[in-house]
Image (tube, rainbow, N blue to C red):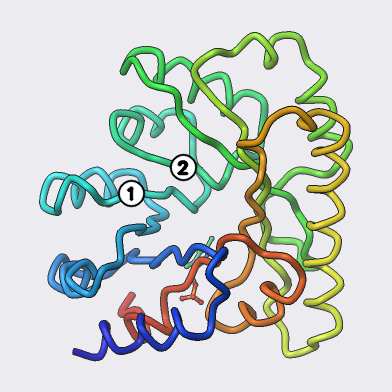
Amino acid sequence: MDVARHISELRNLLPENVELVAVSKFQPIEAIKEAYLSGQRIFGENKAQECSAKYPLLPGDIQWHFIGHLQTNKVKYIAPFVSLIHSIDSPKLLVEVNREALRNNRVIDCLLQFHIATEETKFGLTIGEAVAILESPVIQDLKNIRIAGVMGMASFVDDEDLVRSEFRTLKEYFDQLKSAFFSAAPWFKEISMGMTHDFKIAVEEGSTMVRIGTAIFGERKL
Ligand SMILES: *Cc1c(COP(=O)(O)O)cnc(C)c1O
């Protein structure tokens, strides 16, 4: 019952307005069921095929969040059921998500992923790229996506001040986009930031959604 205990310990640490996304990538169905039975309903996956394989094996009221890098040719696997895509990092991907959402007669909520870490390897937009996307008439015409906020990953380091400043940057990007493009859009409200090792800092800096795997399920067996 470790999974249930970890979830309830985390819930006690998180403010009520912060959503907990249980990152279940690489985890077996049994572990996800245990989390579900403890009341957890939001799960995060980072591989489209793994996510679409798990979906039919688990209860229908789970909200599946996609949190990993998404290739356009994989969107079709998750479009029928995904409830939030955290990782939009190009206009091309947004167009493809819209196309697949339309085919499934749905509107899919999306977050713009920003590159906030000093590390080279992480995906994500710059603020300039995000503004260009939001100003683009092609993107503004898309009816089957809804942009609900921003997401980012801080550097994977012990330097708390650096991590904090990266989260602060993401919060500033959110505020900037909110006032420039979404002041009349109540659904633009999510700041997805914080993982097992840095969620406390993320919450202090304004996170509305933390994505936590290891602290719930233990180390992943790759
Ligand atoms: C794996 C992953 C997480 C969860 O990481 P933990 O350190 O296990 O909490 C969060 N966000 C993204 C994008 C991930 O890929």
Rendered position, 181 above or below 144: below
**Horizontal and vertical percent position of residue 2:** 25, 90
Name which residue lies at 57% across and 63% down: 17
**Horizontal and vertical percent position of residue 60:** 17, 45
**Horizontal and vertical percent position of residue 173:** 84, 49
Q: Are marks 2 and 1 in contact (CB under 8 Å)?
A: yes
Q: Secondary structure at mark 2?
A: strand
> In the image, 174: left or right of 65?
right
The amino acid type found where label 1 is placed reads Gln
Could you tell me which quadrant the C terminus lies in? Answer: bottom left
The amino acid type found where label 2 is placed reads Leu
**In which quarter of the view is residue 221 placed?**
bottom left
Name which residue lies at 26% across and 68% down: 39
Rendered position, 205 above or below 105: below
From the image, tell me which residue sits under label 2.
84
Could you tell me which quadrant the N terminus lies in? Answer: bottom left
Classify 10 Å Cα crowding around label 1: few (below 14), some (14-19), many (20 and above): some
Name which residue lies at 61% across and 70% down: 194
> In the image, 51: left or right of 214?
left
> In the image, 140: left or right of 148?
right
